[in-house]
Amino acid sequence: MPFLNFDSRHFSVNEKNAVTAALTALETALAAKVANLSPEERKQFGSVNEQNKLVINKVKEYRDIQPALGCPDVDWVEFMNDFDTRAFLQGSIQRLQNLIDGMTNAKILHDWDNYQSALIDYDYAKFKFNANVPNYQNKVEELSQFFAGRPPGSKQNTPPESTS
């Protein structure tokens, strides 16, 4: 028998509501701040690579230590606001990514549990069908379409790749 209930951390209704409310609050808080770039704009602006981040950090360091050396044409208040906002966003993105990774991993385990149970149920239906128990023929025929191309009697305990 396959190992079942690998990840039994299920959400109560209250927990689901709390997560949904927190996500809604986050979406509301960020609505006026997030940007929606087209693919062309993403290509145009790209992302600042690590080398260029070093340039930004060095300019900021000089601005902090020797502000008299800074270019008077640069809006230094805006520069610092951009710098601080970027750092805040980067930290927030990392925290969200950690949550996404953890949620994705938990979903994978729940998918695995569902698939293993579905295989057990399919095997049970085949057993009942082969024992000529009424009402199992349609179930076996409908489920067998998902196993086309596999040798009869083979077991496939690996679920198909998840699309999300």
Image (cartoon, rainbow, N blue to C red):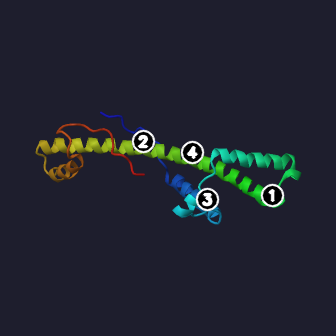
Quadrant in the picture for residue 32: bottom right
Q: Secondary structure at mark 4?
A: helix
Residue lying at the far right of the rendered structure: 68
**In the image, which is nearer the foreground, mark 4 or mark 3?**
4
Name the spot of residue 96 as percent of width and height, x first.
58, 50
Which is more N-terminal, label 2 or label 4? 4
Q: Relative to the observer, which residue lies in front, 51 or 139?
A: 51
Name the spot of residue 133 as percent of width and height, x first.
13, 46
What is the distance, in whole Å, between disc 1 and disc 4 at their CAs? Answer: 33 Å
Q: Residues within 10 Å of mark 3 (few under 14, many from 20)?
A: few
Q: Which residue is mark 4?
A: 98
Q: Relative to the observer, which residue lies in front, 29 or 123?
A: 29
Q: Which residue is mark 2?
A: 109
Residue lying at the far bottom of the rendered structure: 32
Which is more N-terminal, label 3 or label 2? 3
Which is more N-terminal, label 2 or label 1? 1
Circle 4: residue type: Asn
Circle 3: residue type: Leu
Q: Which residue is mark 1?
A: 76
Q: Residues within 10 Å of mark 2 (few under 14, many from 20)?
A: some
Left or right: where 129 falls relative to 89 = left
Name the spot of residue 75 as percent of width and height, x first.
80, 61
Residue at 39% x, 39% y is 5
**In the image, which is nearer the foreground, mark 4 or mark 2?**
4
Q: Relative to the observer, which residue lies in front, 138 or 42?
A: 42
Which is more N-terminal, label 4 or label 1? 1
